[in-house]
Amino acid sequence: VFEAASHASRATRSYALLQVPDEPDVRANQVIERCEREADRLRVGMITFTNASEFETWETRVRAPRVETDPEALEEFIAQLSDAAKKRLARWK
C-alpha cells in the first residue's frame, strides 16, 4: 500500500494488489483490514486476489480516486522509460 502511494504522484489512479489466502485466518484478516484503512487514508486503491491468473478471485476492496497528475511529472516519468515501454504506452488507451 505504501509503495502504491509513492507511485501516486505519477498516476491518475494508483492501486496496491495483495495476494491473500483462500481462507484467511484471524491474523491475515487483521493485515487485510489494516491495508484497507491505509489505502483509504493514503487515497490509493486496493485489490485482493487468491490467484493472480484467475480474475474471478480479484476483489476491489478500496477504489482509487482519480487524482490530477502534474503534466511535468508525467513527462519526466515517460522520458525515463525504455523505447519498448514508450511504444506500448503509446498504443494503450
Image (cartoon, grey):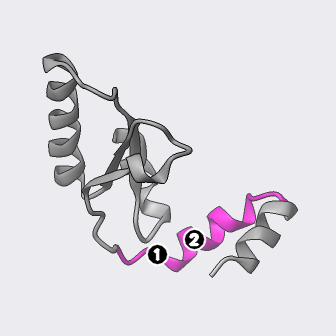
Label 1 SS? loop
Q: Which residues lie in the magenta part?
A: 67-82
Q: Quadrant of residue 26?
A: top left
Amino acid type, callout 2 = Leu
Q: Quadrant of residue 29?
A: top left
Pointer 2: what residue?
74
Residue 70 numbered mark, or none = 1
Label 2 SS? helix
Mark 1 in CB contact with mark 2 (< 8 angstroms): yes
Give x and y (percent) for residue 60.
30, 56
Residue 18 belongs to the span the image colors magenta:
no
Q: Nearer the viewer, residue 43 or 91?
A: 91
Q: Who's the residue at 75% across and 79% down the image? A: 91
Judge left or right: residue 29 versus residue 1.
left
Q: Who's the residue at 39% across and 54% down the image? A: 15
Q: Which of 86 and 18 is in front in this view?
A: 18
Badge 1 crowding class, 10 Å Cα cut-off, few under 14, some 14 to 19, many 20 or more, is few
Q: Quadrant of residue 44?
A: bottom left
